[in-house]
Image (spheres, rainbow, N blue to C red):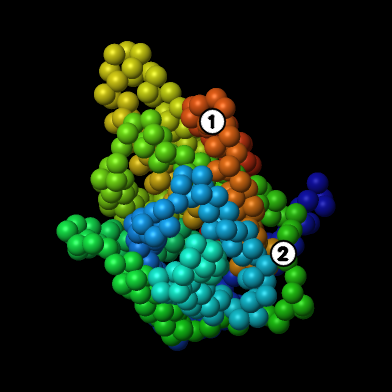
Amino acid sequence: MKRITFTRKIMIEMTRKRRFTHKSQGFGGGGSRGIRMKKRDFTLFLLASALLGITQSIDTSFFNNFLNDSFRLTVSERTILEIPREFPGFAVVFVSTLLLFLGDVRVAVVANALAAFGMMGMGFLAADFNGMVLWLLIFSMGQHLYMPISNSIAMNLSDQANMGKRLGQINGANTFVFLLANLTFALIFKNIKVNYQMIFLIGAITFLLAGCLLILMVPNKPKKAKGYKLILKKEYTLFYVLNILYGARKQIFLTFAPWVLIKIFNQGVSTFATLGFIIAAASIFFKPFVGYLIDKLGERFVLAGEAIILIFVCLGYAFSKEFFEGIGRGELAIIFIFACYIMDQMLMASTMARATYLRRIAVAPEDVSPSLSMGTTLDHALAMFIPWLGGLLWAAWGYEYVFIAGAFIAALNLIAASRIKIPQSVTVMQSDS
């Protein structure tokens, strides 16, 4: 008991000295000038994140049609393409480690440049399918490199007490522009044939504009690295587990939820466009609300709540058709599935809680960015193979069993989330803020 008390006192003292201040991360230092620079950098980062909503709209709205129109891929070929597309997510921890000397902001600039280069290549330089895969790898590396770094930058621009709020604001702005871009593209191309070269050019320019905004930010100054090393620490084991489970859950939604709507309920493109609009519109408010819940009720509440809801969502996917047809109200099944699809997508916002949880338990400030990248790698290590495994399960026993497996994963996620404990030292620090 004495040893535990002594260790806790040391942790509190070390954290008070550390405090994860903006100064320690190199964003403008302290004092009134530091506060002004911090606000300026947050505004620049918010604008850059909002701009990237346009590129996300292009990716989600046009990429699959581009593959179909340009290469006539079969369903099996499209599924296999997920391996090279998701491989950069697995490799991101190694690439980000090599770029560690640049600091988060400059790595984010490099990520946007890679994404722009890859998108231009797909639009103008991909002469055949193999060439397209090469440019897709470059584009995807830029995307996946930016994912963990963006969370790290956002949290560096926040105080301990409002990290969730800041992440919610940034994600809300991104979703708002994503929604506007979707509406704009829908109106423009309603009666006009899509020119993929023009679309990818717009996307590439937008990536570069976002990179220019990031260049204007004060670059953080990382400590000089003692060689290149990966960070894999026992203290972050639960964070790693949460990311692995998220990777499995995410891929089930991305791959199989749409196929249930298409194959089982015979829904077309217009349905997905409508659902996408509803999800984006609701997420403008839902993501900041999740950020608020993180700050007020904590990561355990948010992630456990996500897991509980997801269990029922997966069971809804699996059994709603049989249930409603059994009571003679088969027409209600599709409405229930729509609700599951919308809730499934909106629950992705809880990924903010995994990032803030890591930030709160981090042993040292410089652990945050590489550990977020490690989380992305572990997420994608499993995600690359979930479509293949789920496809085998669907073919052997039916789609219901894919979502029964999803409910089991959600239950494991609930168990993991219930084990979240924020160190007392962080609680003390927040109350002092």
For the residue pair 301 and 261, the one nearer the viewer reads as: 261
Q: Position of residue 333 (x, y in %)?
A: 32, 26
**Could one spot residue 126 in this view of the protein?**
yes
Q: Amino acid at mark 1?
A: Ala
Q: Is residue 16 left or right of residue 263?
A: right
**Could one spot residue 175 in this view of the protein?**
no
Q: Position of residue 230 (x, y in %)?
A: 73, 66
Residue projecting furthest to the top: 327
Residue position for label 2: 231
Q: Position of residue 354 (x, y in %)?
A: 55, 53
Residue position for label 1: 395
Q: Residue at x 35, y 42 (%)?
A: 342
Cα gap from disc 1 to disc 2, whole angstroms? 39 Å
Tag nearer the camera, 1 or 2: 1
Name which quarter of the figure residue 32 lies in: bottom left
Q: Is residue 275 above or below residue 405?
A: below
Query: How many neighbours does mark 2 have within 10 angstroms: few (below 14), some (14-19), or many (20 or more)?
Result: some
Q: Residue at x 45, y 27 (%)?
A: 318
Query: How many neighbours does mark 1 have within 10 angstroms: few (below 14), some (14-19), or many (20 or more)?
Result: few
